[in-house]
Image (spheres, rainbow, N blue to C red):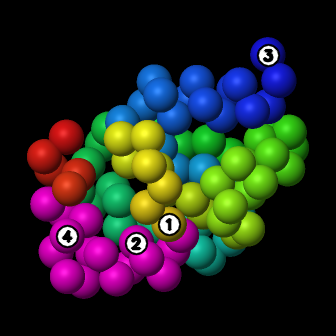
Amino acid sequence: MNALEKIKNQIKKNSIILYMKGSIKYPSCGFSAKACEIISMYTTKCKYIDVLKNPDIRKELPIFSNWPTFPQLWINGKLVGGCDIIIKLSKTGELKRILQNL
């Protein structure tokens, strides 16, 4: 399975997926740490993919998503965005509403 097929399969199989640097317990960048912190306030259903351990995904995902940075949050097969958007949606209450209705 090539990287694009892996990405499509992961997004299809997981209603909430965060592509990030590091792991939920040991994030490797501040943006990924903040995204994990916010998402974990609202749900435990999120699948976390460490792009540092998956260089093929790290290379291919920005092309597929047309989003150049990490983290990337995907919900129900659609790209939500990165850390700034996650923070904004959390502040408005929209992220809590979306995640708790899955």
Sooner in the amino-acid sequence: mark 3 or mark 4: 3
Q: Answer with the quarter of the image where residue 46 lies.
A: top left
**Residue beneath disc 3:** 1
Residues marked 2 and 4 touching at CB (< 8 Å): no
Q: Residue at x 20, y 82 (%)?
A: 92
Q: How crowded is the residue under tag 2: few (<14 C-alpha within 10 Å), some, or many (20+)?
A: many
Instruction: Report the predominant secondary structure element of the magenta stretch.
Output: helix
Are discs 4 and 1 less than 8 Å apart at CB?
no
Is residue 45 at all visible to an observer of this figure? yes
Residue tagged 1: 81
Q: Is residue 90 magenta?
A: yes
Q: CA distance from mark 3 to mark 1?
A: 26 Å
Q: Residue 54: percent from the left, percent from the top? A: 80, 39
Residue that mark 4 sits on = 94
The local secondary structure at tag 2 comes to helix
Q: Is residue 41 above or below residue 64?
A: below
Q: CA distance from mark 3 to mark 2?
A: 30 Å
Q: How far is mark 2 from mark 1, CA to CA?
A: 7 Å
Question: Callout 3: helix, strand or loop?
Answer: loop
Quarter of the image for residue 70 reads bottom right
Q: Earlier in the sequence, mark 2 or mark 1?
A: 1
Label 3 or label 2, whichever lies nearer to me, is 3
Pick the front one: 3 or 53? 3
Tell which circle, 2 or 4, labels the residue nearer the N-terminal end.
2
Q: Position of residue 30 (x, y in %)?
A: 62, 76
Q: Which residue is mark 2?
A: 86
Which residue is found at the position 38% from the left and 47% from the top?
75
Question: Within 10 angstroms of label 3, few (less than 14), some, or many (20 or more) residues?
Answer: few
Circle 1: residue type: Gly
Q: Amino acid at mark 4?
A: Glu
